[in-house]
C-alpha cells in the first residue's frame, strides 16, 4: 500500500468519531431513500401482483332479486361478455366470540368453491364450508378472535343458529378492519337457504368483458342491465374495477408523493451533513494539505486522496444502510400489505431502491464533498500552513456587533463567546440551521397534520349531538321504541331515525356512481342531533318537505347541483321526487368503502315509503358522555327494547365510532412521524458535526482560554451553550416557517392522502415538544465535541498553529 | 583558490522583490526591494528580528508566497510566475523544506513521512523508495525509530526525520525556517552538524534562524531589517566575499 493510501486508511481508522459521524450522516439519507423508495415500489407492485393473482372481475353487479343459473347462461351470450360467475352476499348479525352484543357481518356464498373463475377466494386453512359449517375470512379471524373449531352464533329474524368454523379463507377485497371493515363469513349454498337465500339462485354477478377497457365494461354493464330489466330484474348497484390495479392503491398513491418528498429531503440533509463533515476534515487537515503541497503534492493528488476517503465513507454507509433499508422496506411493505390482506412473507427487495441507494451512497457524497475538497486542493501552501483556511471575519458588520452587544448584556463572558462563535462561520451556521430547521419544520407540519385530523374529527363528532346509536333489526313504531328510551333517567333526549337503501334516479336514469350503499337518512329537522358541514346551500329546516341534502362528492360525480330534482327509488316501498337544497362535506375520504348518505326530513321519507311512523335507528343523548357510562346506558336500553320485542342489531357508542375513524388515519400519520424522526436524527448528527468542526477551528483559542484560567467545565459549557443556542435558533425558525406553511401543507396533504379538506389546527403542543426534543438533541450532540475540547492542552493548542 | 561554489551558477536569484500585505484597509510592505543570490553549495543564514520579513523572504524562494513585484528564479525556474500546481511539482523535486514545528504528518511513521515525497514525485521505484528512506533515516541517526509515529519520538528526532524527508528526492536546494527554534541547544547543534554535512556534499542551504550562536557558524549571513537586506557577509570565509 502506498504511503498516500495508508494515510487515507489511517485517517478513517484513527479518527473514528469523525468517521462514524460521516458514515452515519450518509447512512441516514441512504436508509431513508432505501426504505421509502423500496416500500413504494414493492407496495404498488405487491398490491397489483396480489390483485392480478385472483383474476379480478371487471364488473360487480348487485341485483335486487335472485336469478337462476339459466338466466346467467343467457347473459353469457351478451356481446362483449367474456365470463360471468354468480355469487351471493347477505348481511348477518353474529355474536362475538367473547360474548356481548351482536355485531354486523357479511355472509358470502360462491357457486362452486373449488371452481372459482374470478375474484377468487383462497382457502388458507381447513376446508371449504359444508352444510353445518362456516368459514371465516382470515383477517376477521385474527381481528375478531375466531379460530377453526370455534362456534359462531348467527342471528337473523329472531332466529339463532350456531355453526362451527371449518376453515379460514382469504377474501381479496376485504377492507382492513382498522378502517372499519366488518367480519366476513362463508357459507355453503344449502346452508344459506336458512337465510332466505334460495338454493342455486344468486343476487350478485362477477363479470369479465372482452376486450377489456373501462369504457367497454360500462357498455357491457348497461347492456346486461337492459337484458335483466326485460326479465323484471333490477340492478341495485354496479361497481367496476381495473383488473391490473389493486383497489388499495389510492391509499398508497396519496401518501407516496409525500413520503418520496420526505426521503429526498432526508437525502439532501445528509448531503449538507457530508459537506459539513468534509469541511471539518479539510479544516482539520489544512496544515497537512500544506505540508503535502510543500513537499510536492499536486492538486489532483489532494483531490484523489480526500475523494477516496469520501468514497470509503459512502461505501461504509452503504454497507450499513443497504441491508437495513432493504429489510425495513420489506418489513414495512409486509405490514402494509398484510393490512390489505396480502401475503408478503418472502424477503424481497426493490432493484430501483437499491440502485438509488448505491447512487445516494457514492455519487451524492462525492458531489457534496467536491466543493470542500476542491477548496482544500486549491489552497496555497501559505494559506494552509499559516491559517485554518478561509477565515471567518466576525465583527466586521453591524449584525456581528449587535450579536456581540446582546451577548455582552445578557450572558456571562464565556457564554457570550459561545453566542459570538455561533455567528463566526455564517456559511456553516446556515447549513446547520437548514438541517435543524428542516427537521423541526417537518416535525411541526406532520404534528399539525395530526392535530388537523383530530380537529376535523372533533368538528365532525361535535355536529353529532348524541352519545350512542341503536341499529334496529327492521322497522318499529316510533312510539313503542321512544317510550322505552325516554323512560330511562340517564337519557336526556333521543331521536328516531328511518334509514333506507335507495337508488337515485335523475330524469328517470339511474345515477352512474350511486354506489352500493346509497342510504337515505330520514331525520327530524330542527332537532339537530345530526348536522353535516354544509359546503353549498343549506341544512334541513323545520317545515321542509321533499328536499335532500346530498354529499358534495356524490353530487360532483353525478353532475348534480343545488336545485336539481331527483327521484328516490325505495324499491317496493315506492318512489318520490326530491329537490336538492344543500351539499355537505362527508368526513370519510373517497377511498372506496364509504357509503353515500343522503339526508331528508323523516316525514318526507315516511310519506314516500309509507312506513309512517316507523323508525329503524335511534340516536340517544345521555347525561354522562364517557364511554363507560354510555355503554352502561346503552346496555340497559337494549335490554328494555328487547323486553318490548324490539330487536337491536348493533348498539354503538360515539367514542367507539370515533376510535374506528381514527384508526384509518393513524396508520398514515404514524408513517409520516417515523420519517420526521429520521430527519430529526439527521439534524442531531448535523449539529454534532458542526460543533466538532468548531472545536478543531478553535483549538488555539481553547488553549488561550486555558492559559488564562478557563477550566474544563467552562470550556465544555461554552460548546454545550453554542449547541443549545443553535438548537434554540432553529426551533424559533422552525416555528415561524411551520406557521407559514403548515396550513397549505395540511390542505395539500389532506387532499392528497385523505381526499378530504382538513379543518386546520396548528399544533402548539408540538411546538413545546420540539423545543424539548431539540434542546435534548443539542445537548447530546454537543457533549462529544465539548468533551474533546476539554482534552486540548495549552501546549498542544498553541503548538497547533 | 577558487571553490566550486564560486564557479557554479546561482541556485537562487532574488531581484528587487517587494511584498506588501493589505491589513485592515492599509498596506504594509514587508519586503522593500530585496535582491540577493545564492550559488550552488552555499550555506546561507538569514537573520534579523521577528516581523522584519525573514520568513516572508524564505516563502518567496520556495514559492509558498508570491512577490508583489520583482523576480525570483530558483533552480532556473521563474518561481514568481508558476502556477500553484506547477510549484508543488517543482518543489517536490527541487526543494527540501524543513519547518520550525517539524510538520510531520501525524498519521504516518517516520519512515512513511520520509517516503512520502518520493511517492508524490515517483522519482524512485517502489522498493527503492523504502530503501532510500531507511538509508536517509540511518544518516540522521533514526534507523531504529523508523517505524515509530512522530508523536512517539522527541522534537529533535522529529526534526532529524524532517531533514531526511527534505533530502528524500535528493533536491539541490534545502530551505529551513527556524529549524532549531523548537529544540534545546544540544539538539540544535546536532541538527546544525547535519546541515553542514549535507552542504559539504554539494547541497545548497538557506536557513532562517534567530539563534545567533548557530548563525555564527554559517559561512554566509544575510541580515534583514525592516524589509531590507542590511548585511550580507561571509563570516570566516573571506574567499567567498564579493559573491
Image (tube, rainbow, N blue to C red):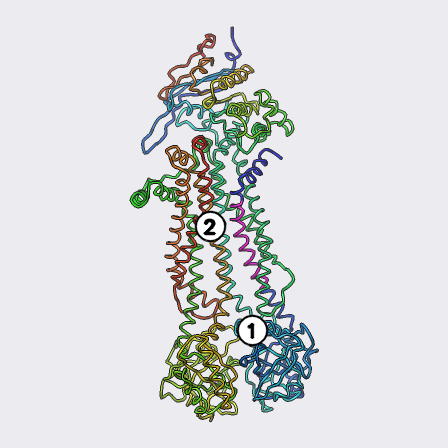
Residue A357: horizontal and vertical position, in percent? 57, 53
Residue A684's label in the rendered image is 2
Residue B78: horizontal and vertical position, in percent? 47, 25
Say how many tags the image has.
Answer: 2
Q: Which residue is mark 1?
A: A175
Q: Is A35 covered by the magenta stretch? A: yes
Asked if residue A336 is positioned above or below residue A395 in the image, the reply reads: below
Q: Are marks 2 and 1 on the same chain?
A: yes
Asked if residue A88 is positioned above or below residue A299 in the image, the reply reads: below
Q: Is residue A44 left or right of residue A430?
A: right
Residue A93: horizontal and vertical position, in percent? 56, 82
Q: Which residues are magenta?
A: A20-43
- Predominant SS along the magenta part: helix
Instruction: Name the chain under label 1.
Output: A
Q: Is residue A565 visible?
A: no
| Chain-order first, disc 2 or disc 1 | 1
Q: Is residue A328 left or right of residue A113?
A: left
Q: Residue at x 42, y 74 (%)?
A: A460
Assign a secondary structure to mark 1.
loop
* Inter-mark Cα distance, 2 to 1: 40 Å
Can you say which quadrant of the picture contains the N terminus of chain A?
Answer: top right
Q: Residue at x 57, y 25 (%)?
A: B169
Q: Is A216 covered by the magenta stretch? A: no
Tell us which disc is closer to us: 2 or 1.
2
Can you say which quadrant of the picture contains the C terminus of chain A?
Answer: top left
Instruction: Name the chain under label 2.
Output: A
Q: Residues within 10 Å of mark 2 (few under 14, many from 20)?
A: many
Amino acid at each position: 500500500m502506498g504511503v498516500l493510501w495508508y494515510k487515507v486508511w489511517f485517517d478513517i481508522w484513527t479518527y473514528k468519531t469523525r468517521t462514524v459521524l460521516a458514515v452515519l450522516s450518509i447512512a441516514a439519507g441512504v436508509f431513508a431513500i432505501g426504505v421509502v423508495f423500496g416500500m413504494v415500489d414493492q407496495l404498488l407492485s405487491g398490491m397489483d401482483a396480489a390483485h392480478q393473482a385472483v383474476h379480478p372481475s371487471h364488473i360487480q353487479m348487485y341485483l335486487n332479486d335472485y336469478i337462476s343459473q339459466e338466466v346467467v347462461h343467457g347473459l353469457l351470450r351478451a356481446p362483449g361478455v367474456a365470463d360471468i360467475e354468480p355469487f351471493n352476499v347477505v348481511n348477518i348479525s353474529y355474536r362475538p366470540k367473547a360474548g356481548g352484543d351482536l355485531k354486523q357481518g357479511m355472509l358470502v356464498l360462491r357457486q362452486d368453491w373449488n371452481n372459482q373463475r374470478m375474484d377468487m377466494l383462497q382457502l388458507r386453512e381447513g376446508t371449504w364450508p359444508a352444510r353445518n359449517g362456516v368459514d371465516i375470512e382470515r383477517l376477521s379471524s385474527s381481528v375478531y378472535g375466531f379460530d377453526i373449531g370455534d362456534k359462531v352464533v348467527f342471528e337473523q329474524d329472531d332466529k339463532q343458529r350456531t355453526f362451527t368454523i371449518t376453515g379460514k379463507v382469504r377474501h381479496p377485497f376485504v377492507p382492513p378492519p382498522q378502517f372499519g371493515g366488518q367480519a366476513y363469513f362463508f357459507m355453503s349454498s344449502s346452508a344459506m337457504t336458512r337465510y332466505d337465500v334460495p338454493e342455486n339462485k344468486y343476487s350478485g354477478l362477477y363479470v369479465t368483458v372482452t376486450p377489456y377497457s373501462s369504457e367497454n365494461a360500462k357498455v357491457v354493464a348497461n347492456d346486461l342491465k337492459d337484458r335483466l330489466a326485460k326479465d323484471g330484474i333490477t340492478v341495485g348497484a354496479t361497481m367496476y374495477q381495473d383488473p391490473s390495479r389493486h383497489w388499495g392503491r389510492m391509499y398508497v398513491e396519496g401518501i407516496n408523493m409525500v413520503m418520496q418528498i420526505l426521503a429526498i429531503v432526508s437525502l439532501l440533509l445528509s448531503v449538507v451533513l457530508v459537506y459539513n463533515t468534509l469541511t471539518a476534515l479539510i479544516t482539520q487537515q489544512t496544515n497537512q494539505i500544506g505540508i503535502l503541497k510543500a513537499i510536492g503534492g499536486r492538486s489532483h493528488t489532494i483531490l484523489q486522496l480526500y475523494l477516496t476517503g469520501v468514497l470509503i465513507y459512502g461505501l461504509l454507509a452503504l454497507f450499513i444502510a443497504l441491508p437495513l433499508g432493504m429489510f425495513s422496506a420489506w418489513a414495512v411493505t409486509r405490514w402494509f400489505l398484510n393490512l390489505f390482506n396480502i401475503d408478503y412473507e418472502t424477503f424481497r427487495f426493490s432493484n430501483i431502491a437499491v440502485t438509488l441507494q448505491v447512487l445516494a451512497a457514492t455519487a451524492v457524497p462525492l458531489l457534496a464533498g467536491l466543493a470542500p475538497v476542491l477548496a482544500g486542493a486549491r489552497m496555497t501552501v501559505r494559506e494552509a500552513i499559516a491559517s485554518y483556511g478561509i477565515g471567518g471575519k466576525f465583527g466586521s458588520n453591524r449584525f456581528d456587533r449587535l450579536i456581540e452587544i446582546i451577548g455582552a448584556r445578557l450572558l456571562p463572558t464565556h457564554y457570550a463567546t459561545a453566542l459570538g462563535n455561533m455567528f463566526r462561520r455564517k456559511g456553516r451556521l446556515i447549513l446547520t440551521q437548514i438541517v435543524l430547521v428542516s427537521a423541526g419544520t417537518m416535525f411541526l407540519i406532520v404534528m399539525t397534520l395530526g392535530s388537523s385530523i383530530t380537529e376535523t374529527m372533533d368538528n365532525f363528532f361535535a355536529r353529532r349531538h348524541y352519545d350512542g346509536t341503536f341499529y334496529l333489526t327492521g322497522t318499529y313504531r316510533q312510539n313503542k321504541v321512544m317510550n322505552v328510551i325516554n323512560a330511562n333517567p340517564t337519557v336526556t333526549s333521543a331521536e328516531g331515525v328511518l334509514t333506507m337503501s335507495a337508488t337515485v334516479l335523475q330524469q328517470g336514469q339511474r345515477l352512474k356512481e350511486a354506489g352500493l350503499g346509497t342510504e337515505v337518512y330520514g331525520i327530524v329537522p330542527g332537532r339537530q342531533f345530526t348536522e353535516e358541514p354544509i359546503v353549498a346551500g343549506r341544512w334541513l329546516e323545520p317545515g321542509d318537505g321533499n328536499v335532500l341534502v346530498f354529499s358534495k362528492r356524490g353530487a360532483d360525480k353525478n353532475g348534480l347541483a343545488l336545485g336539481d330534482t331527483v327521484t328516490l327509488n325505495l324499491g317496493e316501498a315506492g318512489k318520490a321526487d326530491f329537490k336538492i337544497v344543500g351539499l355537505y362535506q362527508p368526513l370519510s375520504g373517497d377511498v372506496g368503502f364509504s357509503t353515500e348518505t343522503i339526508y331528508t326530513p323523516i316525514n318526507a321519507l315516511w310519506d314516500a315509503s309509507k312506513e309512517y311512523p316507523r323508525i329503524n335507528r335511534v340516536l340517544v343523548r345521555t347525561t354522562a358522555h364517557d364511554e363507560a357510562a354510555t355503554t352502561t346506558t346503552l346496555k340497559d336500553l337494549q335490554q328494555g327494547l328487547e323486553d318490548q320485542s324490539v330487536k337491536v342489531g348493533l348498539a354503538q357508542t360515539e367514542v367507539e365510532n370515533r376510535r374506528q375513524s381514527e384508526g384509518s388515519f393513524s396508520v398514515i400519520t404514524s408513517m409520516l412521524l417515523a420519517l420526521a424522526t429520521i430527519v430529526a436524527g439527521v439534524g442531531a448528527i448535523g449539529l454534532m458535526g458542526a460543533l466538532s468542526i468548531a472545536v478543531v477551528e478553535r483549538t488555539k483559542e481553547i488553549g488561550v482560554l486555558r492559559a488564562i484560567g478557563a477550566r474544563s467545565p467552562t470550556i465544555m459549557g461554552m460548546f454545550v451553550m453554542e449547541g443549545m443556542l443553535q438548537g434554540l435558533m432553529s426551533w424559533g425558525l422552525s416555528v415561524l416557517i411551520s406557521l407559514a406553511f403548515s396550513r397549505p401543507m395540511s390542505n395539500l396533504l389532506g387532499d392528497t392522502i385523505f381526499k378530504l379538506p382538513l379543518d386546520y389546527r396548528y399544533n402548539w403542543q408540538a411546538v413545546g415538544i420540539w423545543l424539548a426534543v431539540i434542546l435534548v438533541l443539542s445537548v447530546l450532540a454537543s457533549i462529544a465535541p465539548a468533551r474533546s475540547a476539554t482534552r486540548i492542552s495549552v501546549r498542544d493548542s498553541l503548538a497547533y498553529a | 583558490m577558487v571553490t566550486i561554489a564560486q564557479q557554479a551558477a546561482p541556485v537562487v536569484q532574488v531581484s528587487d522583490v517587494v511584498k506588501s500585505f493589505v491589513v485592515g484597509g492599509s498596506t504594509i510592505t514587508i519586503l522593500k526591494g530585496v535582491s540577493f543570490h545564492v550559488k550552488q553549495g552555499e550555506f546561507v543564514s538569514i537573520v534579523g528580528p521577528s516581523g522584519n520579513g525573514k520568513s516572508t523572504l524564505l516563502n518567496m524562494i520556495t514559492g509558498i508566497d508570491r512577490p508583489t513585484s520583482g523576480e525570483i528564479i530558483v533552480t532556473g525556474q521563474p518561481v514568481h510566475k508558476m502556477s500553484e500546481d506547477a510549484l508543488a511539482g517543482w518543489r517536490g523535486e527541487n526543494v527540501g523544506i524543513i519547518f520550525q514545528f517539524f510538520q510531520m504528518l501525524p498519521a504516518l511513521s517516520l519512515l512513511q513521512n520520509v517516503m512520502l515525497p518520493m511517492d508524490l514525485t515517483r522519482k524512485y521505484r517502489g522498493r527503492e523508495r523504502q530503501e532510500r528512506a531507511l538509508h536517509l533515516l540511518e544518516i540522521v541517526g533514526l534507523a531504529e525509530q523508523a517505524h515509530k509515529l512522530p508523536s512517539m519520538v522527541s522534537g529533535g528526532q522529529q526534526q532529524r526525520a524532517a531533514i531526511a524527508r527534505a533530502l528524500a528526492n535528493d533536491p539541490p536546494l534545502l530551505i529551513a525556517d527556524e529549524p532549531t527554534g523548537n529544540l534545546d541547544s544540544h539538539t540544535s547543534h546536532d541538527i546544525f552538524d547535519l546541515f553542514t554535512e549535507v552542504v559539504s556534499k554539494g547541497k545548497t542551504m538557506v536557513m532562517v534562524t534567530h539563534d545567533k550562536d548557530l548563525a555564527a557558524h554559517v559561512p554566509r549571513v544575510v541580515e534583514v531589517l525592516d524589509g531590507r537586506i542590511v548585511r550580507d557577509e561571509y563570516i570566516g570565509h573571506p574567499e567567498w566575499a564579493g559573491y
